[in-house]
Image: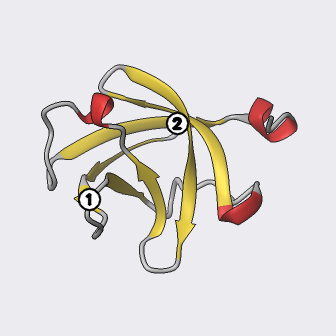
């Protein structure tokens, strides 16, 4: 299961969603539509189904839910573990 540590950063929109950039050395290949890869991510003891998305400006990105980030803020490092969710690739519905 790949693991990495990266700082939180805020997407420049009115809602300012927090996310992390997935390092190139652990970035999975885009396996689904829109350059995404379905994964199961774990941060701060919480695991959820999500996707890593490709971004021309930011490389591979992973959105961080508020309930997962908790009290952390932009610039704080987070440890992320993930695995590709093959079941969602086989049955996306």
Crowding around mark 1 (Cα neighbors within 10 Å: few <14, some 14 to 19, many 20+) is few
- Say which mark, if any, is on residue 92: none
How many numbered tags mark residues here?
2
Name the front one of labels 2 and 1.
1
Residue 72: percent from left, percent from top? 15, 39
Q: Residue furthest top?
A: 45
Q: Residue at x 61, y 39 (%)?
A: 39
Which of marks 1 and 2 precedes in the sequence?
Answer: 1
Q: Quadrant of residue 35?
A: bottom right
Residue farthest to the front?
14
Q: Quadrant of the N terminus?
A: top right
Residue at the right extreme of this rendering:
90
Q: Residue at x 80, y 35 (%)?
A: 93
Q: State the residue position of label 2.
A: 82
Left or right of 25, for residue 92 = right
Packing grade of label 2 (10 A; few <14, some 14-19, many >=20) is many
> Residue 6: percent from the left, percent from the top?
29, 52
Residue extending furthest bottom?
A: 57
Which element type, helix, strand or loop, lies under badge 1? loop
User: For residue 49, which quarter of the picture?
Assistant: top right
Q: Residue at x 86, y 36 (%)?
A: 90
Rendered location of residue 85, percent (x, y): 69, 34
The residue at the point 75 percent across, 60 percent down is 33
Location of mark 1 (residue)? 16
Q: In terms of secondary structure, where does tag 2 sit? A: strand
> Is 20 situated above or below 13?
above
Q: Nearer the viewer, residue 51 or 2?
A: 51
């Amino acid at each position: 299961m790949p693991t990495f540590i990266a700082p939180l950063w805020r997407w420049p929109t009115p809602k300012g969603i927090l996310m992390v950039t997935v390092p190139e050395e652990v970035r999975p290949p885009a396996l689904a539509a829109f350059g995404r890869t379905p994964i199961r991510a774990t941060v701060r003891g919480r695991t959820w189904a999500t996707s890593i998305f490709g971004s021309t400006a930011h490389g591979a990105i992973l959105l961080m839910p508020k309930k997962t980030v908790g009290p952390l803020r932009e610039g704080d490092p987070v440890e992320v573990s993930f695995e590709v969710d093959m079941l969602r690739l086989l049955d996306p519905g």
